[in-house]
Amino acid sequence: MLASRDQYKGLPFSDPVFMKIIFWLPRPKGHYRTGRFAGQLKPNAPVYCSSTPDLDKLCRSTLDGLSAKCGGCIIADDSIVVAIQAEKRYATDAESCGALITVSYA
């Protein structure tokens, strides 16, 4: 919610919108090698996160945080979202944890 206020200065969207959200989550320690190769990813470390948190819960909390009814500033209400494309993946060394959110008119 706070980051969206820094990034967006317009009026909240009030017409139907599409949303695309990519969530970057921290990697568990088990994805990394140990010993002499500590800090390097194991060759079989996955790109996508198939464990908790659930993707639908991440989407719901994000939509609530963007909704003007809940204190956000991007969309008037989460009911105007008519389609969502979402994924959750592990952050790489070059990425930080967080989310990239794109909103466009339907």
Image (cartoon, rainbow, N blue to C red):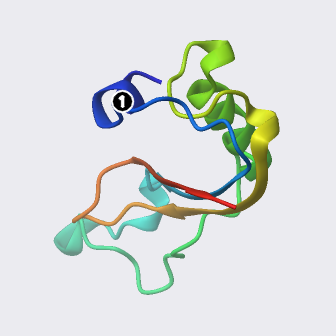
Q: Is residue 106 left or right of residue 44?
A: right
Q: Which residue is mark 1?
A: 3
Q: Is residue 16 left or right of residue 99?
A: right
Tag 1 secondary structure? helix
Q: Nearer the viewer, residue 32 or 87?
A: 87
Q: Choose top left, top right, bottom left or bottom right for residue 98.
A: top left
Asked if 95 appears above or below 8 in the picture, the reply is below
57 or 11, which lies in front?
Answer: 11
Residue at 33 percent across and 30 percent down: it is 9
Image position, residue 29 (x, y; %): 42, 54
Q: Is residue 6 left or right of residue 62?
A: left
* Outermost residue to the left: 36
Estimate the x, y position of residue 48 in percent, counting from the top left. Answer: 58, 70
Q: Is residue 49 visible?
A: yes
Q: Which residue is found at the position 45% from the left and 66% from the top?
A: 31
| Quadrant in the picture for residue 40 | bottom left
Label total for image: 1
Check the image and report above or below for 106 versus 43. Answer: above
